[in-house]
Image: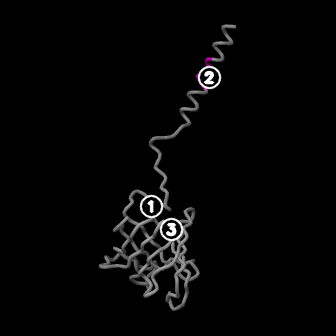
């Protein structure tokens, strides 16, 4: 009987230690909720553009931008995006798994020689801060990254 009690105690103690050991790791990096993080007003501060396409590999570099375009994303899935001319409003959807923003403009925009009202752009983000977004501007087929814009938060 005494051995059975000791065995039960040892089993319960071992299970408790195992549960605690498998619990939350305080040193694990915090997972961001990007859908909440992107809400607010952002302004382009830098642009990553092609410098020389004749060399292999092609040369790209960051350039400071004064009074860059703004992007305002609201919780109700509406946006104001000043990068593409006079049509600046619409609705958006965000795919957190792909870090992809789909913009549905209220009218047509001019995008690399095409007239469109739906645009997809991707986020490539520094996960350590809540003050910058890296927006990836792709080609019309969304297969090749054309340029990047670093946006800084200017308002929540």
Which quadrant of the figure contains the C terminus?
bottom left
Counting from the top left corner in percent of width and height, residue 45 is at 34, 73
Q: Earlier in the sequence, mark 2 or mark 1?
A: 2
In this rendering, the label closer to the viewer, 2 or 3: 3
Which quadrant of the figure contains the N terminus?
top right
What color scheme is it? one colour
In this rendering, the label closer to the viewer, 2 or 1: 1
Q: Nearer the viewer, residue 69 or 55?
A: 69
Crowdedness near tag 2: few (<14), some (14–19) or many (≥20) residues, C-alpha within 10 Å: few
- Residue linked to disc 2: 12
* Labelled disc at residue 37: 1
Disc 2 from disc 3: Cα separation: 49 Å
Q: Residue at x 42, y 74 (%)?
A: 71
- Residue linked to disc 3: 76
Q: Residue at x 39, y 60 (%)?
A: 130
Which range is magenta? 9-14
Circle 2 SS class: helix
Secondary structure predominantly adopted by residues drawn in magenta: helix
């Amino acid at each position: 009987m005494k051995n059975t009690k000791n065995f039960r105690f040892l089993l319960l103690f071992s299970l408790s230690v195992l549960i605690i050991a498998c619990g939350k790791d305080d040193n694990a990096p915090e997972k961001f909720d990007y859908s909440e993080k992107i809400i607010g007003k952002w302004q382009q501060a830098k642009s990553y553009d092609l410098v020389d396409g004749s060399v292999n590999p092609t040369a790209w570099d960051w350039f400071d931008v004064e009074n860059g375009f703004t992007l305002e994303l609201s919780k109700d899935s509406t946006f104001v995006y000043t990068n593409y001319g006079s049509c600046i409003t619409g609705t958006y959807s965000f795919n957190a798994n792909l870090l992809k923003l789909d913009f549905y403009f209220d009218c047509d925009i001019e995008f690399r020689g095409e007239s469109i009202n739906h645009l997809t752009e991707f986020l490539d983000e520094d996960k350590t801060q809540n003050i910058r977004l890296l927006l990836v501007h792709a080609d019309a087929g969304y297969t090749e990254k054309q340029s990047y814009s670093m946006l800084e938060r200017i308002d929540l």
